[in-house]
Image (cartoon, rainbow, N blue to C red):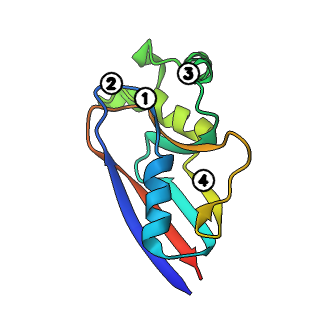
Amino acid sequence: MKTFRKELWFETRTRRAFINITPQVDAAVLESGVRDGLCLVNAMHISSSVFINDDESGLHQDFERWLEKLAPHEPVKQYRHNDTGEDNADAHLKRMIMGRESVVAITGSKLDFGPWEQIFYGEFDGQRKKRVLIKIIGE
């Protein structure tokens, strides 16, 4: 069995962003040499996310609106976490909603997706460096 590890680094200009990372994960699968196996992609920071969904701008706007209704950023004093001087409690909650990681099967050296599926990095407290881990195992 082969194993492969790669990190992706992000520093968004905005507090929140959704970035399609499917091309980078595809490239990692090819680089790994794994023909059949599993690919784990996970956010290595507690205020960001990795998830699978459609790459459609209206849907991304819907995510933004929905998440802000569930865990609004303002007022920052509504969260006990922010009593520590932070202002990112909402980002931690948004990460819990969108998830930490995604696992995709690899078949024939390709990510084995359903229709329209893509992998995204979700940033909820950006403007600083954060990383995503890609871990591939298989034959």
Q: Which residue is tagged 3?
A: 57
Q: Is residue 73 above or below residue 122?
A: above
The answer to whether residue 121 is seen in the rendering is yes
Which of 137 and 109 lies nearest the eye of the viewer?
109
**Label 1 environment density (alpha carbons within 10 Å; few <14, some 14–19, many ≥20):** some
Task: For marks 4 and 1, give the CA distance.
Answer: 18 Å
Q: Which residue is tagged 4?
A: 102
Task: For marks 1 and 2, give the CA distance.
Answer: 7 Å
What secondary structure is found at the residue carrying circle 1?
A: strand
Instruction: Write the residue at 59% across / 75% down.
Output: 35
The answer to whether residue 80 is seen in the rendering is no
Q: Which mark is residue 82?
A: none
Q: Is residue 94 above or below residue 46?
A: above
Q: Residue furthest top?
A: 75
Number of numbered discs on residues: 4
Q: Which residue is tagged 2?
A: 14
Which of 15 and 46 lies nearest the eye of the viewer?
15
Instruction: Write the residue at 49% across / 79% down.
Output: 3
Task: For marks 3 and 4, give the CA distance.
Answer: 21 Å
**Of the image marks 3 and 4, the number of the one nearer the N terminus:** 3
